[in-house]
Amino acid sequence: MSGPQRFIPQESGVLLGRFAPMEADLLRLATTQLLEMLDSGAADLGVAASDGVFGRLLPAAYRDDDEAAAEFRRFTAPGLLERKAQNAQIVLGSLGVGAGETDAATQTDSADRQPVTIILDEGAVQAWLRSLTDLRLTLADRLQISPDGIVHLEGADTPFLRELYEWLGMLQEDLVYAIDV
């Protein structure tokens, strides 16, 4: 692992994390968008069942039996989407944004702002790991990343989305390294 440690274990058992203001803003935005998508999927499971991103977030339990997979999803999807939304709320809360709040800090020049320091207990670490996975799965669908890792999306947004996908993967890796000490 190169570069400074982003997450540092403390003697008390929590992790201390540090983000540049722009990084925290990006995480807030991406997580807020994830939460909105999860809420829309929970509000209309029919839409969720037909949207490819939910296929990655809620994979089929029975790949060879569409009827059994649909029945399983009908019973499990609401609870899974709710837990995913709760994890996203924990990420936002640790970044200093509560439910339904807008972040006034993003309205100011980031050059004038201090780094964002967060404290994660064991539960928050797990929520972060799960939300980072959900964010990456969502981006993988948007980028049309195939199982062999090839990006098939072509467009003006592709370089940014790919860099975001890779950055989220590095954050996830940093977090795993921090809890593995």
Image (cartoon, rainbow, N blue to C red):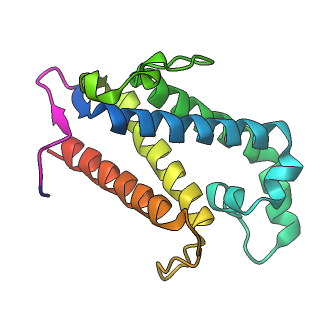
Image-based side of 145 in relation to 57, left or right:
left
Q: Residue at the spot x=71%, y=64% of the render?
A: 60
Q: Position of residue 67 (x, y in %)?
A: 88, 67
Q: Is residue 5 magenta?
A: yes
The answer, for residue 15, to whether it is visible in the render is: yes
The image quarter containing residue 59 is bottom right
| Residue at 37 percent of width and 61 percent of height | 166
- On the rendered image, what quadrant is the N terminus found in? bottom left
Q: Quadrant of residue 2?
A: bottom left
Whole-percent x and y of residue 14? 23, 25
Is residue 178 left or right of 41 when viewed as pictured?
left
| In this picture, residue 175 sits left or right of residue 78 | left
Number of labels in the image equals 0
* The one of 49 and 150 positioned closer to us in this rendering: 150
Percent from the top left, x then y, of residue 52?
A: 72, 63
Of residues 166 and 1, which is closer to you in this image?
166
Say which quarter of the image contains residue 99. Answer: top right
In-image side of 155 versus 53 (left or right): left
Residue lying at 52% horizontally and 76% vertically, measured from the top left: 151
The answer to whether 73 is drawn above or below residue 112 in the figure is below
Q: Which is nearer the eye, 69 or 111? A: 111
Q: Main secondary structure of the magenta part?
A: loop
- Residue 41 versus residue 88 in the image, above or below: below
Query: In x, y percent, where is residue 40?
Result: 77, 39
Tell me if residue 117 can be seen.
no
The magenta segment is: 3-13
Tell me if residue 161 is in the magenta stretch. no
Judge whether 79 appears above or below 110 on screen: below
